[in-house]
Amino acid sequence: QAKRQGRNTFQWYTEGLNKRVSGRVRLRNALQHAIDQQQFELHYQPQIQDTSGRILGFEALIRWHHPERGYILPAEFIGLAEDTGQIIPMSEWVLRTACRDNVRLNALGFEEYVMAVNVSPMQFQRANFVTGIVDTLKQTGLAAPLLELELTENILMESTTKAIEILQMLRRLGISIALDDFGTGFSSLSYLKYLPIDKIKIDRSFIREVISDHRDAAIVQGIISMANQLQLKVLAEGVETQAHYAYLSKKMCDIYQGYYFARPMPIDELITFLHENEAANQLQQQDQNDSA
Ligand code: C2E
Ligand code: MG
Ligand code: MG
Ligand code: MG
């Protein structure tokens, strides 16, 4: 049964409650081991600007590189890590690694890309959240404007005045803020009036059938025009096809992220990808100069 669901699925999620409980204990122990043994990796997925086709930056996505099971996706372990508090050391590692990798890109001449990092609810609620980020920027040497933090609506709902203060501090430092999975939370829209944010990421569940389902189309169009009028950047997640891209582009979406452009990839692959992209841009530039 479990085998049929593929190698990334833990069997304890598919079995009875008893097994599930002991499964959680086992998963927690396995996670601790993974933290101690540094079995995590970050994969980076490019974000593409609509008008220029330029890469603006990347989102850092955690993977658990399990010695026997291969790559395990965050859906399998982030929730439990949040429950057990293991998300805290994990998040510190993520932030440090993402910043360090962006500094590595800077050293290779890729100096303008913004690194987006997902923030977990528990991480955001910690008293030392902002100082932790400032310290990590200092230690890694990454410039604050090259860091973006992705937060979900649910995180910001908890205590809105406090959240606003924290976001203001971060933005004063030069860090940008994206609202992740927009449209899937249970919050009211009124908070968009007050929250100091830079970007809205439309959840990919609305993009998947945006062309065939007029309800998704209405929601996506609504979000885009609202974002435009609030002077927020708007990014579509889960852009998988040329048709998605053409449709969204017509609707004035600013930024895209999805398999159509690139999958999340390890840092070495990303570096190759950026070099190829640079070479392609130079060729295009030459063509334009020649024909001018
Ligand atoms: P998210 O922040 O909304 O990340 C986008 C997810 O969409 C990623 O899944 C990405 O691989 C996937 N994706 C990108 N393009 C496409 C596409 O064209 N089609 C489809 N079907 N999917 C696409 P992933 O990597 O499995 O991550 C899932 C979630 O886990 C993330 O959703 C985020 O909430 C969480 N997560 C990932 N990394 C971290 C992390 O370092 N820290 C925390 N706290 N959460 C993380
Ligand atoms: Mg995200
Ligand atoms: Mg998202
Ligand atoms: Mg999502």
Image (cartoon, grey):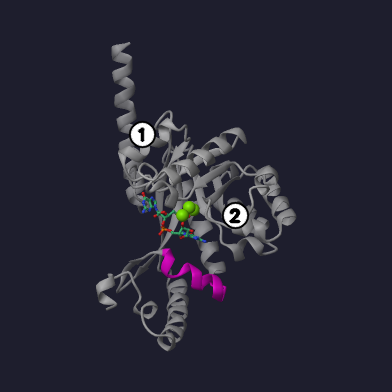
Please say whether residue 84 is one of the residues in the magenta stretch: yes
Q: Are marks 1 and 2 in contact (CB under 8 Å)?
A: no
- Front-most of 179 and 207? 207
Image quadrant in which you'd find residue 251: top left
Query: For this view, does 189 lie left or right of residue 61?
Result: right
Query: For this view, does 101 lie left or right of residue 148?
Result: left
What is the distance, in whole Å, between disc 1 and disc 2 at their CAs?
A: 28 Å
**Residue 204 position in % (x across, y down):** 43, 50
Amino acid carrying label 2: it is Glu
- Front-most of 162 and 276? 162
| Residue at image mark 2 | 153
Q: Quadrant of the C terminus?
A: top left
**Residue 61 position in % (x across, y down):** 44, 56
Image vertical order of residue 122 relative to residue 171, above or below:
below
**Residue 86 position in % (x across, y down):** 53, 72
Which range is magenta? 74-86
Residue positioned 36% across, 41% down in the render: 211
* Outermost bottom residue: 18
Q: Secondary structure at mark 2?
A: helix
Q: Which mark is residue 246?
A: 1
Judge whether residue 73 can be spotted in this image. Answer: yes
Q: Secondary structure at mark 1?
A: helix
Residue positioned 43% across, 64% down in the render: 74
Query: For this view, does 143 lie left or right of residue 203?
Result: right
- Mark 1 vs 2, N-terminal side: 2
Residue positioned 47% across, 79% down in the render: 28
Circle 1 residues within 10 Å: few <14, some 14–19, many ≥20: few
Amino acid carrying label 1: it is Ala
